Amino acid sequence: MKNKKKIVLTGGGTGGHLYPVIAMAEEVKRKNKEVEFLFIGIKGRAEEKVVPSLGYPIKFVLAEGFPRQKKPITFLRFFFKTTLGTLMAAYYLLKFKPSLIISTGGYTSAPVIFANAFLSKTGLIKAKSFIHEQNAIPGKLNLLASKLVDCIGVTFPQTLSFFPQKKSYLVGYPVRRDIGKKDKKEARDILGIKQDSRVLLIIGGSLGSKTINHAIVNALPKLMEKENVVVIHQTGNSPKYNGYKDTIKLLKKKGWQKLPDRYHPLEYIKDIDLYYAASDLVICRGGSGTLHEIMASSLPSIIIPKPGLPGDHQAMNALELKKKRVAKIIYEEISFKNGKSEMAVNPRLLAEKSLTLLFNDKKKTEMSKRAKELFVSNPIDKIGDILQSLLNGSFPENHNKFSFYESYKPSLINLEGNSLINALEEMEKDGKLNLLSQDELKYLKYKADGYLMSERWQTRNNGVKLVGLTKYEKRISFLL
């Protein structure tokens, strides 16, 4: 139809970037009868399977994450892929002629944002653009992209200080409206789960987590000792790691020729709202998207942050929720296997914490209640209003409830590398290391393990210093 609104969606790679953009698309669809979508992503990532299964057409471009290593070849590859991806995106935008571009950022959306900025400047298309930043500390490409878009939505108040004030909006995290709405009894009936079961849901990410998958397999004998425990395990899958095959292979190696009736490994869970509703406890990574969905579902969680990410944002998210008493944390640590060291999740600790929470009804109820209180209302309403204004060709009124923009002030645990070591050495000089809380010490020991496993000798050296400063006796044998 002539008046049909056309919208480009972009931002994938992982479920954390993908599902917010889907939530926003569904909100636009709810408010507009005549609307057409096109998703632009990259092959081999979460969007390749999920987007078509949800009924959205998809096109693919090339993209590459911003290089962390200062090697000329990595910068050349980044520049080549981003440039070619931008030209591919420009072709799709010229052909589709959208009125609005909705992005959740990340390197997968960079070519679309760059192409739209160029085409809009030359007058070839007239599309408004909106980018949503999920994390407290934006990545490099999102900081660059923010200069090229019309509006920016952020999840956390402190993130506003990174972006231009006039076009930045505090909106929260967009969660799909179906999350947290289903009845537990009905969900269990649909999934064939007994009503008196204690249901443990494991979601290590759409691309799969080897460390979590292996920990669950190793913890399974202990978990299955309790007759009414049901374990639903999303293994994930990606071109680099087939989580489902790896999990089944390890199960057989451990003697599970026939899987227990109460253990359900699944490559991917499409109707995640149904599984949230049926569950009592979730084990997950620390991505902002998953954690907001869990809070919307009023569920307690055990968070296993993925190490080595920019700003260690998953650990920051986990610590924030632990402080609010809605989650527990288990960190990955160095494990020794066949004479080699690798990062792993302690399966004994995982089984103990899971069973303790599953069978402590009072604690579960308290954590569930606090999770519900944290997720007071769905931010998708506010985001929907902003998107509708842009779609109508106008700019929404900036209605942040702040008279000033809160600056980001890093605490000790936000520091990295030499800055972290210098701060701790100053504390040691002043006799203040004993003031570190147990949560801070646990986090710093987790950082030490990550540093010790690094390929860079400078980072390993900081790991050695961190072991000494935190009196991490368990790692002394690793160093000797």
Image (cartoon, rainbow, N blue to C red):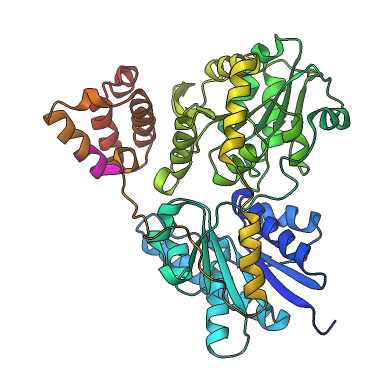
Q: Which residues are magenta?
A: 415-422
In the figure, residue 360 lies in which quadrant?
top right
Q: Is 454 situated left or right of 300 in this image?
A: left
At x 44% / y 71%, what residue is drawn? 166
Q: Count of labels shown?
A: 0
Residue 144 on image: x %, y %: 43, 68
At x 46% / y 28%, what residue is drawn? 331
**Residue 416 lies within the magenta run:** yes
Do we see residue 37 in this rendering? yes
Which residue, as the protein is rendered here, is positioned at the far left? 429
Q: Is 138 situated left or right of 467 in this image?
A: right
At x 65% / y 40%, what residue is drawn? 296
Residue 387 on image: x %, y %: 64, 68
For the N terminus, the image quarter is bottom right
Q: Is 197 situated left or right of 330 in this image?
A: right
Residue 367 on image: x %, y %: 58, 26
Prevailing SS of the magenta stretch:
helix
For the C terminus, the image quarter is top left
Do we see residue 137 in this rendering? no
Residue nearer the viewer, 101 or 335: 101
Residue nearer the viewer, 464 or 366: 366
**Residue 255 lies within the magenta run:** no
Which residue, as the protein is rendered here, is positioned at the far bottom? 123
Task: Relative to 413, say whether 400 is above or below.
Answer: below
Q: Is 424 situated left or right of 254 in this image?
A: left
At x 23% / y 38%, what residue is drawn? 421
